[in-house]
Amino acid sequence: MRKPLHQKARPYCKINLGLHVVGRRPDGYHDIETIFVPVRTLKDTLIIHESPTPQMIQDGIALDNAPEDNLCMKAWRLLHDEFGVPPVAIHLKKEIPFGAGLGGGSSDAAFTLQLLNARYLKLPHPMLHERAARLGADCAFFLYDRAAYATGIGDQLQKCPGLNLDAYRIVIGIPQGEHVSTKEAYAGLNPALFGAPRPNLLEAIRQPIEKWRHLIVNDFEASIFPTHPAIAKLKEEMYQHGALYASMTGSGAAVFGIFRK
């Protein structure tokens, strides 16, 4: 007899090393180029157990969406509708801030897919990857479980040779009260950036970290910093406190600094 379902996971966040917006697609999405790096010092808590009806319980950091609209519930619904995965109760304790460019919601959804797949389906990784990409552009990265060079809308992932941050610590900060929606971030982009030449990210990360400041750029900073000066200030404070490299991650509002341990 199968034991009752009770699975727990700790979805982690990510940062972006560089973020180039390459162009706008006919479907309204944007093609990007970036390097996703997992950061396991900031995590949510996800618990799934059997339930006669689907339930979504949220605590920790208050979210701005209804429980039924949470990406975890959308992940369950996707597998339920396609493969008949039975109802479950999902308990999510949020510690990764949302609207910060840290990918917390995508990570939660990816880990939900993983737990449900391990229990009920045993789908091969390519099939799970494709379904993760339906939920969000960076969801598939959290199935990858290592740094990745990402293209397309962020769902096309490749190995990232030459990147090793084991000798460093990553510090993440968010200015008090700052929140940047993805819609706001993309609306402020200068279309002249699309297709503009940039340093090659895979070559840039092979350079000493001290040189990254002049090589690795997040395109969103140019539009976000003037309207959110507190984010720009936090980036400069990271450098003042000894960061070897600092940047806004994703479309903000979080900023990270890479320091020697």
Image (spheres, rainbow, N blue to C red):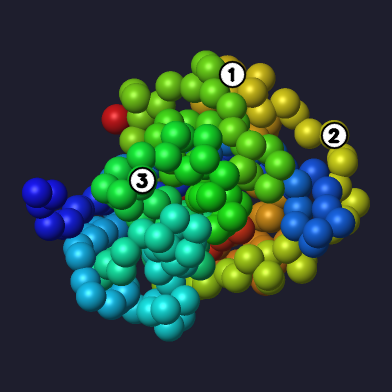
The label shown at residue 197 is 2
Image coordinates of residue 197 in percent, x first then y, are 85, 34
At 51% from the left edge and 50% from the top edge, which residue is drawn? 132
Q: Secondary structure at mark 2?
A: loop
The label shown at residue 175 is none
Of residues 130 and 162, the one nearer the viewer is: 130
First in sequence: mark 2 vs mark 3: 3
Between marks 2 and 3 in the image, the one whose residue lies nearer the viewer: 3
Which amino acid, by three-letter code, is at mark 3?
A: Leu
Q: Is residue 261 visible?
A: yes
Q: CA distance from mark 2 to mark 3?
A: 44 Å
Query: Tags 1 and 3 in contact by the CB under 8 Å rule?
Result: no
Which residue lies under the disc numbered 1?
A: 207
First in sequence: mark 1 vs mark 2: 2
Q: Is residue 60 visible?
A: no
At 43% from the left edge and 22% from the top edge, which residue is drawn? 164
Q: Secondary structure at mark 3?
A: helix
Image coordinates of residue 124 in percent, x first then y, are 44, 34
First in sequence: mark 1 vs mark 3: 3
Between marks 1 and 2 in the image, the one whose residue lies nearer the viewer: 2
Residue furthest to the front: 1
Q: Does 162 sit above or below residue 209?
A: above
Query: Tags 1 and 2 in contact by the CB under 8 Å rule?
Result: no
Image coordinates of residue 37 in percent, x first then y, are 47, 37
> Is 175 situated left or right of 220 in this image?
left
> Is 221 situated left or right of 136 in this image?
right
Between marks 1 and 3 in the image, the one whose residue lies nearer the viewer: 3
Query: Tags 2 and 3 in contact by the CB under 8 Å rule?
Result: no
Which residue lies under the disc numbered 3?
A: 121
Of residues 90 and 179, the one nearer the viewer is: 90
